[in-house]
Image (cartoon, helix red, strand yellow):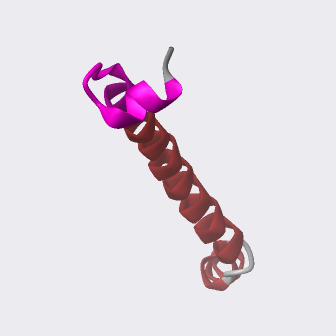
Amino acid sequence: MKAVLLRFLKDETGATAVEYGVIIAVLSLAIVGGIGQVRDGIIWLFSDNSSRLANAFGP
């Protein structure tokens, strides 16, 4: 039983896949948060009626 436990503790074959999964999860959260910030910035940019950009694309 002790040999099986030691072999399990030394086995690192799945460590890389777990690390890549954590990296992907963190990047996904950063992208989702960034998209929200960009959306808010674009809404603010086009909501100002005195803005030249809003007047160029608006009616």
Where 55 sits versus 24, above or below?
above
Front in this rendered view, residue 36 or 13: 36
Front in this rendered view, residue 42 or 52: 52
Residue 47, image x, y percentages: 33, 20
Q: Residue sitting at 43 percent across and 46 percent down?
A: 34
Give the main secondary structure of the magenta stretch. Answer: helix
Residue 40, visible in the rendered structure: no
User: Number of callouts in the render?
Assistant: 0
Q: Residue sitting at 53 percent across and 57 percent down?
A: 27
Front in this rendered view, residue 7 or 47: 47
In the image as oriented, which residue stretches furthest toward the top?
Answer: 59
Q: Is residue 46 magenta?
A: yes
Which quadrant of the view contains residue 54? Answer: top left
Q: Is residue 49 magenta?
A: yes
Q: Residue sitting at 59 percent across and 69 percent down?
A: 19
Where 29 sits versus 55, above or below?
below
Residue 21, image x, y percentages: 64, 60
Q: Quadrant of the N terminus?
A: bottom right
Residue 59, image x, y percentages: 51, 14
Which quadrant of the view contains residue 55? Answer: top left
Residue 56, visible in the rendered structure: yes
The residues colored magenta run: 42-57
Front in this rendered view, residue 53 or 11: 53
Residue 5, image x, y percentages: 64, 74
Where 34 sits versus 12, above or below?
above
The answer to whether 33 appears left or right of 3 in the picture is left
Which quadrant of the view contains residue 18? Answer: bottom right
Q: Residue sitting at 51 percent across and 41 percent down?
A: 32
The answer to whether 33 appears left or right of 48 in the picture is right
